[in-house]
Image: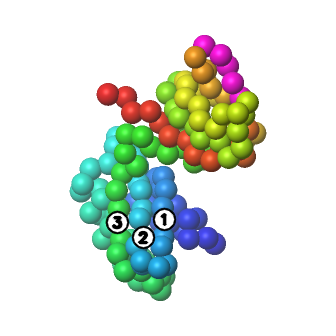
Amino acid sequence: MTLEAKLEATLAGLGYELTDYSFSAKSGLMRVFIDKPEGVTLDDCVLVSNHLSHWLAAENMDYERLEVSSPGMDRPLRKLADYQRYAGREVQLRLRVALAGQRRFAGRLLHADPAEVVLDVAGREMAFEMDNIDQARLVPEL
């Protein structure tokens, strides 16, 4: 089982979703980004940090520092479920391979399936292959 799968299972047991994580073996820094439907508070981050500190020790994970935070208002979209949950919201995409000479697109997320994500970009419906999306983020609603 991968570290990501273990983190997802552990956090789900606490009522949180793993939105992203990173680990740098060089610096020993592990960053974990969590979310829940009603949003993440500082108390949530403290609770998860304490739990993960004990869990990582039990897993013999060698790390120096652990940072736990919310994904922010510009939350990344990584999984199909993320795209489906945020249908109707404004998103920004960065593609791995340019489409018509362009790698960055912004528009309203219409729908997504395992093969593609469809956006309304300036009134034009555009489909993007899921495998070609390098990064996707929500546009913050203020």
Residue 70 on image: x %, y %: 36, 51
Q: Are marks 3 and 1 in contact (CB under 8 Å)?
A: no
**Between 106 and 8, which is closer to the camera in this rendering?**
106
Q: CA distance from mark 3 to mark 1?
A: 10 Å
Residue tagged by mark 1? 22
Asked if the magenta segment contains residue 43, the reply would be no
Q: Is residue 121 found left or right of 66 in the rendered image?
A: right
**What label sits on residue 124 in the rendered view?**
none
Q: Is residue 89 visible?
A: yes
Q: Which residues are magenta?
A: 123-128
Q: Residue at x 56, y 65 (%)?
A: 4
Identity, as a three-letter code, of the amino acid under mark 2: Met
Crowding at label 3, few (<14), some or many (≥20) Cα neighbours within 10 Å?
Answer: some
Residue tagged by mark 2? 30
Q: Is residue 111 found left or right of 40 in the rendered image?
A: right
Q: Quadrant of the rendered structure where residue 119 is?
A: top right
Q: Quadrant of the rendered structure where residue 32 is?
A: bottom left
Secondary element at tag 1: strand
The mark nearer the N terminus, 2 or 1, is 1
Residue 8 on image: x %, y %: 52, 61
Q: CA distance from mark 2 to mark 1?
A: 6 Å
Q: Are marks 2 and 3 in contact (CB under 8 Å)?
A: yes
Residue tagged by mark 3? 67
Q: Quadrant of the N terminus?
A: bottom right
Q: Residue at x 42, y 70 (%)?
A: 30
Does residue 114 sit above or below 120 in this rendering? below
